[in-house]
Image (cartoon, helix red, strand yellow):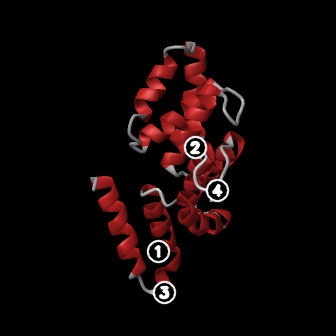
Amino acid sequence: MSIKSLLATLVVSLSLAAPGWAQSLTDISKATGLHMIGRYAEALKLARPLAEKGDPVAQWILGYMYEFGQGDLLKNHRSAAEWYSKGAEQGYSESMAMLGNLYVVGRGVPQDYLLAHMWFNLAAARLVLNADKARDELARIMTPAQIAEAQRLAREWKPKK
């Protein structure tokens, strides 16, 4: 058993023992663990209602499942971008990085290097693995004026609650 599978199993097991007052935290923990071990239909059942209520982690899970066509969901980059956007706009770093990836290639959103750079920059500031590398690699094909504008957008960005 891999470490990732072991950790996911532990998260699911511990979340089953949580008291009732921690139900939404328990559900997102379960959904995350189930997603990590490939039990996508169960993860979707838990994550969708939470995502619809505004939980940014659940929104990331739905975005990921749409992007890669996991569980009962068909691959749909537009839906992936919509869910990642909802999480990113609340400040969820993983959604920021994934949304940046979609903007680089124009999947589900128009290709936009400025927004991709902005989202990568925000994700890098929150220590998302390789977001700084993605931002720096993208900057190699941008003009100095584009980079300056993307940096301004990142400085002025504020999360929505």
Is the residue under label 2 in contact with that under label 4 (CB below 8 Å)? no
Give, as a three-letter code, the residue at label 3: Gly
**For mark 4, does the 10 Å Cα neighbourhood hold few (<14), some (14 to 19), or many (20 or more) residues?**
few
Question: Which residue is the site of mark 4?
Answer: 72
Give the CA separation, mark 4 to mark 2: 11 Å
Residue at 42%, 45% (x, y): give it.
126
- Residue 125 at what x, y percent from top left? 43, 40
- Residue 52 at what x, y percent from top left? 68, 64
Q: Which of the two marks, 4 or 3, is nearer to us in this view?
A: 4
Question: Which residue is the site of mark 2?
Answer: 68
Give the CA separation, mark 1 to mark 3: 9 Å
Residue at 48%, 27% (x, y): give it.
135
Question: Does label 1 or label 3 sit earlier along the sequence?
Answer: 3
Above or below: residue 105 compared with residue 65: above
Give, as a three-letter code, the residue at label 1: Thr
Above or below: residue 159 compared with residue 7: above
Question: Does label 2 or label 1 sit earlier along the sequence?
Answer: 1
Q: Which of the two marks, 2 or 3, is nearer to us in this view?
A: 2
Q: In which quarter of the image is residue 103?
A: top right
Asked which secondary structure carries label 4, the reply is loop
**For mark 2, does the 10 Å Cα neighbourhood hold few (<14), some (14 to 19), or many (20 or more) residues?**
some
- Could you tell me how many numbered marks the image carries? 4
Question: Which residue is the site of mark 3?
Answer: 20
Give the CA separation, mark 2 to mark 3: 33 Å
**For mark 1, does the 10 Å Cα neighbourhood hold few (<14), some (14 to 19), or many (20 or more) residues?**
many
Mark sitting on residue 15: none
Which quarter shows the C terminus?
bottom right
Q: Which of the two marks, 2 or 1, is nearer to us in this view?
A: 2
Asked which secondary structure carries label 3, the reply is helix
Asked which secondary structure carries label 2, the reply is helix
- Residue 29 at what x, y percent from top left? 45, 67
